[in-house]
Amino acid sequence: MDDILAPIQDAFEGQIDFHGQQTTEILSTALLVVSGVVAFLVGYIFQDLYLTLWTGLAGTLITGLVVIPSWPFYNKHPEKWLGPLVGGAGGAGVVVDGVKVA
């Protein structure tokens, strides 16, 4: 069962790197501006406010589908984090009430 649920869990965890965060910010801004301009032009050409609002809503939904899920291309440059220091003088550990916990 874990083999089936693992990919679904990975998709919902939102694992993206710093470059992916920058990409999503640029994409969301650009797509919302483009959808706003397209909605304005559609509304102006057809002289219909209702159509303008639906076009803007469609652009917002498309932007959400592109930006909100953690697509694999948002995690192409993962950071290499340091592992835990075990023993030695480098790790001070956590001291709680005078007792070293970790």
Image (cartoon, helix red, strand yellow):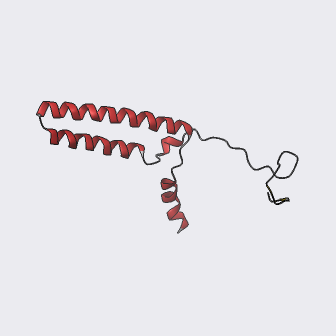
Nearest the camera: 1 or 28?
28
* Number of numbered labels in the structure image: 0
**Can you name the residue that lies furthest to the bottom here?**
1
Percent of width and height locating residue 54: 21, 43
| View extreme (right): residue | 89
The x, y position of residue 36, in whole percent, is 28, 34
Residue displayed at 24% across by 32% down:
38
Q: Is residue 88 left or right of residue 49?
A: right
Q: Is residue 7 above or below residue 53?
A: below
Q: Is the residue 88 above or below the residue 97 in the image?
A: above
Left or right: residue 76 compared with residue 60: right
Please name the residue shown 68% across and 43% down the image.
81
Q: Is residue 97 above or below residue 90?
A: below
Give the farthest residue toward the front.
Answer: 97
Quadrant containing the C terminus is bottom right
Locate residue 44: give its quadrant. top left
Q: Nearer the viewer, residue 35 or 1?
A: 35
The spot of residue 35 in percent (x, y) is 29, 35
Q: Residue at x 50, y 64 (%)?
A: 4
Residue 16 position within the rendered picture, expressed as x and y whole percent measured from the top left: 53, 44
